[in-house]
Image: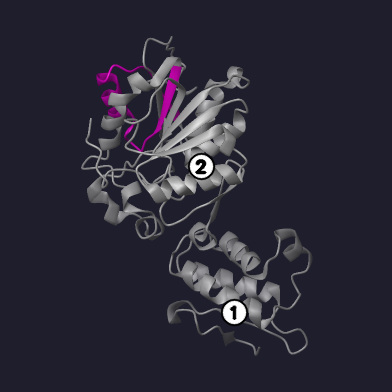
Amino acid sequence: MRVGQEIQALPRSARLNIASTPEVGVTRGAVLQALRTMLADSGVESFATDARLLLCAAVGLRHADFISNPERALNEAALARLAPLAARRAAREPLSRILARREFWGLSLAISPAVLDPRPDTETLVEAVVGQFASRRAEPLRILDLGAGSGAILCALLTEFGAATGVAVDLSAPAAAQARANLAACGLAARARVAVGCWGRAIRGPFDVVVSNPPYIPSGEIGDLEREVRDHDPALALDGGRDGLDAYRAIGGELGALLAPGGRFFLEVGAGQAEDAMAILRANGLTGMATRADLSGVARVVGGCAAACGETSEGPACGAESEAAECTPRRMPLGGERKKD
């Protein structure tokens, strides 16, 4: 390749200009730098990390291999594989969608267009459950994940609680299939069951833990989301109704019948929704309310129980500070992960 040669498959607004030398050709380092520049010019905030991961994926390299030999030349086949991947990321398709995988709670999970892309903020919900049930790790807990999507939350919890069993429920059959595949890939299929259904209507309790990351974006705000979310996450997994709280109304009416004595629920909420969600849950007879904040300080999880459960100022349900809609396809989640606030 000559200096400045361009991969013409990329958009004109984001061409990948790659420098080469007659002696070596196009090196890994040169391609990485060009890819960083292209992604940065396209408005990708995580351009440095994404460039490295895209290059490693296209070439089939581990990060350590790339670091140890950045001056090694890339062949035409590797560049041909990289070009369409780079173009997709420049067009603001999420890296996880391009690679069809997402790491969550240390697990590598497959994702598809049918499910929401698991976000790191949802690990706050897993942390809340692990903290609350730390003394019961060896018990055969029963866990229910409502609106499970990819199964990320249930996979994480069954990994943490080795004697537990779990049920994942989703209205979408393709989402349920994705959850089933991820549970199997993580070696958890023998302890899990996946069902297609509307929240907990077809499920019989009791469960020690009920978790959910339902859709909570107000319908009128979906068009204002970042392109990575708006254009690539399923609308069914985002739309929480007019005020974003439809799912909490539906789930709130079912939790009392689903929870075992001493059982607790943990629900992810959007920024600024915790108080309203707790009010809905209290109106359904739930108690012991608490919240848990994510790393940004946003109250991300609301928890509680179905009967008096010894709430304290520390917030028993989440280890943090204290304190029914019809089921229609438009309102049901296809994934159990964070939505963009």
Q: Is residue 287 magenta?
A: yes
Q: Is residue 282 magenta?
A: yes
The magenta stretch is 263-292
- 64 relative to 325, above or below: below
The residue labelled by disc 1 is: 80
Secondary element at image label 2: helix
Residue 265 is drawn in which quadrant? Answer: top left
Which residue does the image show at 41% across and 45% down from the upper left? 335
Q: In this image, 20 relative to 250: left or right? A: right
- 87 relative to 137, above or below: below
Residue closer to the observer: 22 or 55: 55
Image quadrant where one finds the N terminus = bottom right
Rendered image: mark on residue 152: 2
Which residue does the image show at 57% across and 21% down from the upper left? 140
Amino acid type of disc 2?
Ala
> Mark 2 or mark 1: which comes first in sequence?
1
Q: In this image, 129 relative to 32: left or right? A: left
Which residue does the image show at 59% across and 59% down from the upper left? 49
Amino acid type of disc 1?
Ala
* Residue 114: image location, x then y, percent: 40, 53
* Residue 33: image location, x then y, percent: 62, 72
Q: Evaluate whether residue 237 shows in this view.
A: yes
* Residue 77: image location, x then y, percent: 65, 80
